[in-house]
Amino acid sequence: MTEVQSKRAPWRDTLHEIIFGAETPAGKWFDILLIVSILASVLAVMLDSVSGISKNYGSLLGSVEWFFTIIFTIEYILRLICVGRPLLYATSFFGIVDLMAIIPTYISLFIPGTEFLLVVRILRILRIFRVLKLVQYMGEALFLMKALRASSRKIIVFLFTVLTLVIILGSMMYLIEGAENGFTSIPRSIYWAIVTLTTVGYGDISPQTNIGQLLAAGIMILGYSIIAVPTGIVTVELSQLSSKKATQSCRECSAEGHDTDADFCKYCGAKL
């Protein structure tokens, strides 16, 4: 690995620091300009979906879209060039997001005919997912994603418990109220239990009997306590991950989130 890294051209290392790094002035400016470009391109897609604006400024918005597509294409190519393992980055989450940010515009060129307008529209809407590119430029977002991933098992158990609870409560309400009060089936009663437990309260179905209203009141109170559970789970994981992490990105696999005193990448073993 050391021999491979020693053969890297200096300009690739410099390019990697600018594109993947956030500790140098050039890297910070690159991130800022790219974030502005992403937001502007997403705004263009949104405006293009408004019929009045699209009718009057469709050609301008089309030119803007191609401008950003070319910018993101160049960015994507540069990312593949500066990393040591291009295939590893291309198949990563952010690599796929980067590709999805540009490929719909190119595909739309090869779908002629009015019968495919719906497909073209779907491809154009996919460009809205460029907003996902913002995640890789926000250290706090990556930190939160790690906390959610670490607490996923606890959250799954919590969701399974809530699912069991709403099935039981919905079935009880079905027995108490019955079809004459709008609870025509157990699935519909479960829907009411979910709406009530989450404190949404659409009001399309409501209990009419005293026992049903008493049960509903208990579910409402229970809902407030349940909402706090996933927050507490994620908060604990955040506190455990609160140790300072470096913003340095691996030159080989582009992975981030290394410890400040790390000398090697914990994902591919390359020297940082």
Image (tube, helix red, strand yellow):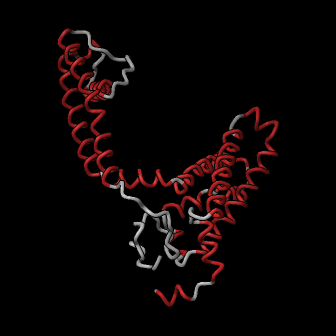
Q: Is residue 106 left or right of residue 143?
A: right
Q: Position of residue 75 (x, y in %)?
A: 66, 64
Q: Decide which of 194, 205 is in the foreground and name it.
A: 194
In this picture, residue 127 sits left or right of residue 221: right
- Residue under the point 21% across and 33% down: 165
Task: Name the residue at 46% across, 65% down.
Answer: 256
User: Residue at 52% of width from left, 77% of height from top?
Assistant: 85
The residue that appears at 46% across and 64% down in the rendered structure is 246
Tell me residue 39's x, y (percent).
Answer: 65, 47
**Residue nearest the viewer, comparing 198 with 230:** 230
Q: Position of residue 37 (x, y in %)?
A: 68, 52
Image height of 115 relative to 171, above or below = below
Residue sitting at the far bottom: 3
The picture quadrant where one finds residue 99 is: bottom right
Q: How many marks?
A: 0
Res 229 seen here:
yes
Q: Position of residue 121 (x, y in %)?
A: 65, 46
Q: Nearer the viewer, residue 72 or 16?
A: 16
Whether residue 133 sits left or right of residue 208 in the image: it is: right
Q: Is residue 40 above or below residue 97?
A: above
Instruction: Indicate whether 7 appears above or below 247.
Output: below
Which quarter of the figure has residue 182? top left
Residue 114 shown left or right of residue 31 in the figure: right
Residue 111 can be seen in this image: no
